[in-house]
Amino acid sequence: MGEAYRFPLAIVDGLRLDKPLRDALLPGRIVYDAAGRARRLPRYFYEIPSWEQARNLQLSPSFALWEFIQTDVREAAPLRAFPRYVPCAITMLALCLERLRVALGTFVHIAANGGYRSPRHAFSMNATPHSWGTAVNVYRIGDVYLDDREAIERYAAVARGVLPGAWTRPYGTQRGETDDHLHIDFGYALLLPRDVPDDHLGFDAERRAS
């Protein structure tokens, strides 16, 4: 039998990164969503050594890693250079988008700043699933730009039908709505790699103290 497959990116504990990166990623910290609910940020990340590796690594047949990490100067400065760090749940997101792409039978284009964004990104005013690696903003499907109500609502309905548990932003111009892309997310999922100890959230310490 062949050697077991290993994902080519190293898993790193965000608490062991240098302080500028910790301050940008806030690993394991509690933040609050727009409704005031507490959410715990990811602590474990895949380390991306270079842009070349991001371009060459396919997370699914149709999506490469680079598509999920396109950001501009709105991202925190320590996260604009390599190595870059992305929550482990990004692999789950890619598989979900692959399912959508197969159902649609055409290309699905992720917007810049529309994949993973750190909690220190300028768009991250509250906890957002983008900081968990579980949300994407899609600006175009095939030849259709998602910049009007009919297109956004039509493809949002398809996404919800194909992807169990998916949430899409309603059309509109108010906060929490969208009028120039389709937002799809799967909530605040934390993907725990198999080699990470089960006390990664401090559960063992809590048991010892009780």
Image (cartoon, helix red, strand yellow):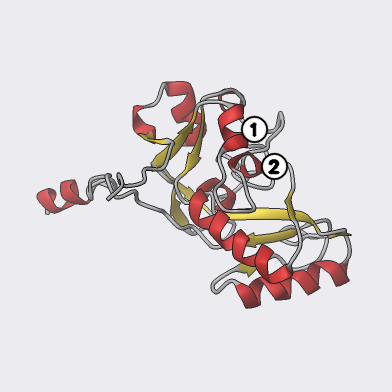
Q: Which mark is residue 75?
A: 1
| Front residue (pair 103, 132) | 103
Where is residue 89? Give x, y as percent.
Answer: 47, 51
Image point (44%, 29%), residue name? 22
Residue contact at pointers 1 and 2, CB within 8 angstroms: yes
Label drawn at residue 113:
2
Q: Secondary structure at mark 2?
A: loop
Residue shown at 71%/74% (left/top)? Answer: 158
Above or below for 4 versus 23: below
Taking depth in this image into account, of 7 and 191 the one nearest to the observer is 7
The amino acid pointed to by label 1 is: Glu
Where residue 82 appears, as percent x and y from the top left, is 55, 23
Q: CA distance from mark 1 to mark 2?
A: 8 Å
Quarter of the view holding residue 123 = top right
Secondary-structure class at tag 1: loop
- Say which amino acid is labelled 2: Asn
